[in-house]
Image (tube, rainbow, N blue to C red):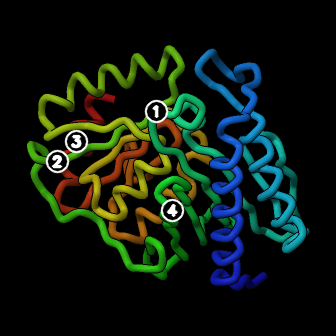
Amino acid sequence: MDRDLGAARELAVGLAVRAGRLQIDRRDTLRVGAPKAHANDVVSDVDIDSEQLIVDAIRAAWPDDAVQAEEGHGRDGASGWKWVIDPLDGTRNYISRTGPWSVCIALYQGDEARMAVVHEPVAGETFSAVDGGGALLNGEVISASGGGSLAEALIGVSFQPNPRTKDRAGRLIREVLPLAGDIRRLPAALNLVYLACGRLDGGVALDTKLWDIAAGALIAREAGVVLGGRDADFSTELTIGAGPALWAELSEKVRKAA
């Protein structure tokens, strides 16, 4: 079944902006629920309501599409298309007011990402891409960093804060930080879209979920970022990204450390 990906992007951008506005408006009155998988895996009523807003509109527009969403509003579909949604990537930052977060929406056809949106509410920045159509930031074309020296590179690091992954991240940082210009810890989606617009030279994400990286990965790829993991394909277990000039050096170091 064909799909108008431009119309899908237009809908996703509008929904991401609406969800981001809800998140800003309700930040002073949010309620934090019980942790999910571990003590640092927190969720708020704003996460849940943001997801409901997005999913309800997608169901109204394309009722036969599948939905995979972080906070449980998923469903099977019959169209061959699937929406992958993280309504608030970076909940800990959002709750604690210590850093950025984003709204992430991706559309898959089978196993292939075809459209993606990542919206950062506070900055008012909306990153988007359509498969084969390049990557945009607020409607303007973006591209990956051309930097090729790891010693001068700014590297984004993302990881789930469970004990096992923190141990992996600690080993990675011990190996890579002395060789790099500097690192920044970021939610996975923003790590990838900051790679896409050249703010970061490289990035690594450990033990994510598909909804954390689905949208950002397509945007990064469309901006010219090279993506991989333990081998040629990136995965939720390990995602490495860099501009073409830095890719070989960074991926070699990360694979050894991670």
Numbered disc in front, either 2 or 1:
1
Tell me which label, 4 or 2, sits earlier in the chain.
Answer: 4
Q: Which residue is mark 3?
A: 252
How far apart are labels 1 and 3 at the CA level? 32 Å
Q: Which residue is mark 4?
A: 124
Residue 255 placement (x, y as % from top left): 30, 36
Residue 180 circle label = none
- Amino acid bearing label 1: Thr
Q: Secondary structure at mark 1?
A: loop
- Amino acid bearing label 3: Glu
Label 1 Cα crowd, 10 Å radius (few <14 / some 14-19 / many 20+): few
Point 14% across, 40% down: residue: 181
Residue 153 circle label = 2
Is 122 placed above or below 59 here?
Answer: above
Is 25 placed above or below 128 here?
Answer: above
Residue 105 placement (x, y as % from top left): 64, 59
Q: Which residue is mark 1?
A: 98
How far apart are labels 4 and 2 at the CA level? 26 Å
Tell me which label, 1 or 3, sits earlier in the chain.
Answer: 1
Tell me which label, 3 or 2, sits earlier in the chain.
Answer: 2
Question: Which image quadrant for residue 157?
Answer: top left
Image quadrant holding the N terminus, namely bottom right
Point 22% across, 41% down: residue: 252
Question: Which image quadrant for residue 212?
Answer: top right
Q: Viewer-proximal residue, 18 or 106?
A: 18
Point 53% across, 75% down: residue: 131
How far apart are labels 4 and 1 at the CA level? 17 Å
Tell me which label, 3 or 4, sits earlier in the chain.
Answer: 4
Tell me which label, 4 or 1, sits earlier in the chain.
Answer: 1
Label 2 Cα crowd, 10 Å radius (few <14 / some 14-19 / many 20+): many
